[in-house]
Image (spheres, rainbow, N blue to C red):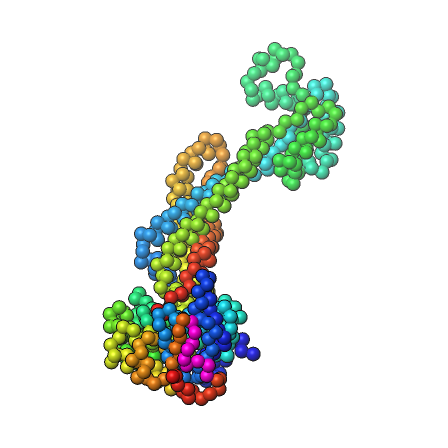
Amino acid sequence: MATDPRRKTESGRGAASHSSPWKEQARSYLDHHRKIGRDSAQRLWRAPVASLMTWMVMGVALALPVALLLLLASLEGVSAGWESSARVTAYLDLDVPLEDAQALAKKIDADGRVAEVQLIDREQALEEFRASSGLEDALDYLGENPLPHTLLITPEERSRSAAGVEALVTFVKGMEGVERVQVDLGWLQRLNAMTDLLSRAVWALAILLAAAVILVIGNTVRLAIESRRDEILVAKLVGGTDAFVRRPFLYTGAWYGLGGGLVACLLLESALWWLSGPIERLAGLYRSDFSLMGLGMDGALTLIIVAMVLGWLGAWVAVKRHLDDIEPGEIAGG
Amino acid sequence: MIEFRQVTKRYDSDHTALAQVNFALNRGELAFLTGHSGAGKSTLLKLIMVMERPTAGEVIVGGQQLNSLPRRQIPYIRRHIGVVFQNHQLLFDRTVFDNVAMPLEVMGASPRDTGRRVRAALDKVGLLSKEKMNPIQLSGGEQQRVGIARAVVNKPPVLLADEPTGNLDPELSADIMNLFTQFSQVGVTVLIATHDIALVNEMQRRTLTLEHGRLVAGGAALVGQPPGGVSGH
């Protein structure tokens, strides 16, 4: 019957002031959250050096993996740009006549994975080569055209992945009269493999550093708990619930996260600014439009939110481990 | 309001702190709890506050059986028990007002309500003019009264006091006893642990005496008897 002791004693003693409507209860709950949030922020503010150091540690730990992730994303941008221009070049046997080459081109063109096939016959190829290489005399000396008919095959959009192109290469290789198939994707595949590997390594690093952040915040919050031991005891003695006792520390963790996230954003932006000049010059030398991606508004916001969640988690770990230890024990002398 | 039925509390090391204690305190009753050091006074208070659980027997506060009370319900029980500590347990990082407001804060009372009730409690103990001070600036007697104001600010039906007059001179002790009497007159059940025999004798109230964990005097009043109708000895 009397599962809620509050209600029972209230009705027993007629303390009407307890029974505020739920709206007022909700408001005072929110007020309390605001007060605790502000109070825990002020506490950090009052110890600026210690707080700043925690923020820096967190900022560095967060900025490192995020910087690597940004670099990876930039590299993937490069390979994506190249994949879209991927073309397969098939060199035919020297003794294949032009009609057979045209038939072959049609046959390949009919395949679903192929968007376009362009036939460059050997005469045309020789002309082009003559014009561009400056080896006219040498070619004349050869007497015979050393170049085969060539098919330039452009894959369909959806087959432009590394695997798709590879399948296409196998298909073309199997055709009669094809001597050699070349894709200049080797370096791209190596880059892809490398970015795959790197991305795994970066994620592993990110997870490790996130764990480190949680532990650092946990330890910092543990010290905060120790320094507010008396307050926790009194709060528990006067009937503060676990949630009530935990709340200021969870806010503390989240504020550490906010600071750490901001520091990380700042570090990333300044690193980007510092590196952007040399990178542009380097990319220019490679005739690439490669550029380092910045965080952007969304990225910065995500980073800060993730940092706050990590801080909150760290505080949660500390609170779980240490708040239960603080139980009011000694109240009487005998 | 408070009832102990055959309560035994044994600690790990074969040390029996309380043995088969029976008593009941009614609403509005004021009683003393005495006994030598180590007789089990603090264990008894801790059982009421659910800081400890009995090894055997039943502890009932406000009709609520505390033995089977889940851990998460403990705070709600404590909100109905005001406690006055010998060492005050005040926080020196905040004002007198904020100290007294703590029980209301944990209940989530609105600021308006809190202000009104804290001032009423401070007025009751005669410290209204000092609400903005830090408790560290107050004398021992004043600190004790701040502790009392905090214990009664949310009008709990039960008030426990642990050596409330321990470090105070007789005049201040009398003041504080006077306050406790007033609370009992408005229906609060008051239990005061003390070994100040002179005070106990002077007050002529029911006295529970513990000796080596056994209740040797003042026990087992029947539930339902009128308040104040039973006296010790």
Q: How many marks?
A: 0
Q: Nearer the viewer, residue B57 or A32?
A: B57
Which of the 4 image quadrants contains residue A190? top right
Q: Position of residue A98 (x, y in %)?
A: 72, 23
Question: Residue A50: image x %, image y %?
Answer: 33, 52
Magenta stretch contains residue A131: no
Residue A112 horizontal/vertical position (percent) = 71, 38
Q: Can residue A254 be seen in this view?
A: no
Residue displayed at 48% across by 71% down: B8
Q: Is any part of residue A143 visible from this angle?
A: yes
How far across and how far down the image is residue A266, in percent? 39, 48
Q: Residue at x 59, y 37 (%)?
A: A84
- Judge left or right: residue B136 versus residue A293: left
Residue B201 falls in which quadrant of the image? Answer: bottom left
Left or right: B111 as drawn, with respect to A208: left
> Which is more toward the observer, A208 or B28?
B28
Vertical placement of B8 versus B173: above or below? above
Is residue B117 rendered to the left or right of residue A300?
left
Task: Tell whether position B220 is magenta.
Answer: yes
Span of residues in magenta:
B213-221
| Relative to A285, residue A68 above or below | below
Position of residue B65 relative to residue A42, above or below, is below
Q: Which sits in the foreground, A284 or A317? A: A317
Identity of the residue drawn at 28% across and 70% down: B135
Q: Which residue is drawn at 61% across and 11% down?
A: A141
Rendered image quadrant of residue A139: top right
Looking at the image, the residue that sits furthest to the top is A141
Figure quadrant of the C terminus of chain B: bottom left
Image height check: is B2 above or below A187?
A: below
